[in-house]
Amino acid sequence: MSTQGHPAKRLTQGHLTRRLSQLYAGLALYGASAALLVEAGLGLEPWGVLHQGLAERTGLTIGVVSIIVGAAVLLLWIPLRQRPGLGTVSNVFVVGLAMDGTLALVPEAHSLAVRIPLLLSGIVLNGVATGLYIAARFGPGPRDGLMTGLHQRTGRSIRLMRTAVEIAVVVTGFALGGTVGVGTVLYALSIGPLAQLFLRVFAVPAASDGSTVVATGQPRGAILRP
């Protein structure tokens, strides 16, 4: 007897489809929002500073550098005994490709009248993207998992691990030629509340009982600052 049209099966398939759609839409939007911050030229998010600095030194595109760094960070999960998910691996490639694609499409901005809206749009869209892909619950990004792995291995708080890693990343990126500015500070202050808001907005109901689940465990703790 076929169960193809069974309501429970259709519900499960629809639930998975929504989660996958959120995952890839969120990752693509994350790359696009990061590209807007690059175009604004008023300061990048911490890892973006490092990516831009490495791109300046190597001649590679910032998206390709993002992919290489993401893969390298993922290798650090091995000694930290972290387990990647579909979202983890997808994050490495989709974000970088979306970033380069957006940079190729968006014209270069020169006046502050254009750069400031680009900065604000990039930060808000980054919060939306974070809510989308984290609420899909397919695993944290490579950089987020690094911080939670360090938290588990050292016993130090996630906040401390995140702060230490991101300070090191920003300092290194700035020394290599990455852009640090008002956008970096504004991003640091606003991304936590924005991501928290959009995690609730895009929370996916559980397939079993219809209850709402917002990214729990590692992803939330790694990304959102209390």
Image (cartoon, helix red, strand yellow):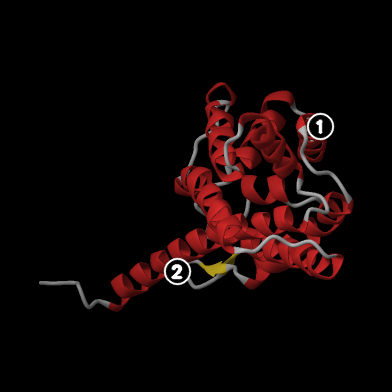
Residue sitting at the far top: 79
| Residue 121: % across, % down | 74, 67
Task: Report, in whole angstroms, how far the alpha carbon at label 1 lies from the one at label 2.
Answer: 35 Å
Where is residue 120, by image quadrant?
bottom right
Neighbourhood count class around disc 1 (C-alpha, 10 Å): few under 14, some 14–19, many 20 upward = few
Q: Where 180 sits versus 187, above or below?
A: above
Residue 85 horizontal/vertical position (percent): 47, 44
> In the displayed structure, does residue 217 sit left or right of residue 10?
right
**Is any part of residue 144 visible from this angle?**
yes
Residue 134 in sight: no
- Circle 1: residue type: Ala
Sequence order check, earlier mark of 1 and 2: 2
Left or right? Give the position of 167 relative to 83: right
Residue 8 % position (x, y): 32, 73
Q: Any mark on residue 18, and which?
A: 2
* 12 left or right, relative to 143: left
Q: Nearer the viewer, residue 123 or 84?
A: 123
Q: Tag on residue 164?
A: 1
**Residue at image x 52%, y 43%?**
92
